[in-house]
Image (cartoon, rainbow, N blue to C red):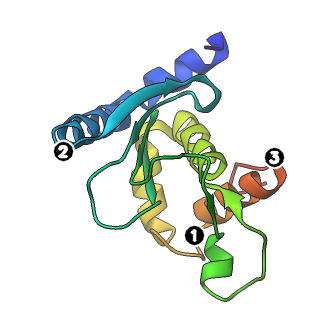
Amino acid sequence: MRLWWLPGICWTLPNSVIGLLAGAIGMLWGARVAWRPRDCALVFRRMPWRGVGGALTLGNVILYTGDDPESPCFTYAHRAGLAVEPCISLADHERAHVYQYMLLGPLFLPLYVLCGGVSARNPFERAADRYALQRSGWWPWW
């Protein structure tokens, strides 16, 4: 772990605790957990909620419904018919959210909701897609 991540990990700890609780519950139904240093996150795979291949990030915890975090997926803009873009790595997209959480800490969730929630128009989602496409630009207002 990089030492400069430590303040961000502490700052977003309230969000991570929610993710840890959700992951622990998921483990009762078969979810598997592993630390992914590249993502600076504890990753729960095979989360038993509806859908295949989706993900949710809560602080430094990523909850995947699928088995492979590197699985390809479409960007939000592509799915909404706003752009034609190549598939991205779900892990790269979620890593951008981890970085966003580490900067905003407990402010992330309220800001995310105020910006439109799960939507192609949400600047947090657009930035995560941009990061997954280009490996840079995870901050929504760059």
Which quadrant would the C terminus be assigned to in this image?
bottom right
The residue lying at 52 percent from left, 74 percent from top is: 119
Which residue is labeled 3 in the image? 136
Which residue is labeled 1 in the image? 122
- Of the residues under marks 3 and 1, which one precedes in the sequence? 1
Report how far apart the C-alphas of labels 1 and 2 lie in the structure: 32 Å
The residue lying at 46 percent from left, 33 percent from top is: 60
Q: Secondary structure at mark 3?
A: loop
* Foreground of the two, 75 or 45: 45
Q: CB under 8 Å between callouts 3 and 1?
A: no
Residue 66 on image: x %, y %: 44, 53
* Foreground of the two, 102 or 107: 102
Please identify the quarter of the rendering in which residue 7 is found: top right
Residue farthest along the bottom direction in this orientation: 81
Residue 100 appears left or right of 83: left
Amino acid type assigned to the residue bearing label 3 in the image: Ser
Report how far apart the C-alphas of labels 2 and 3 lie in the structure: 36 Å
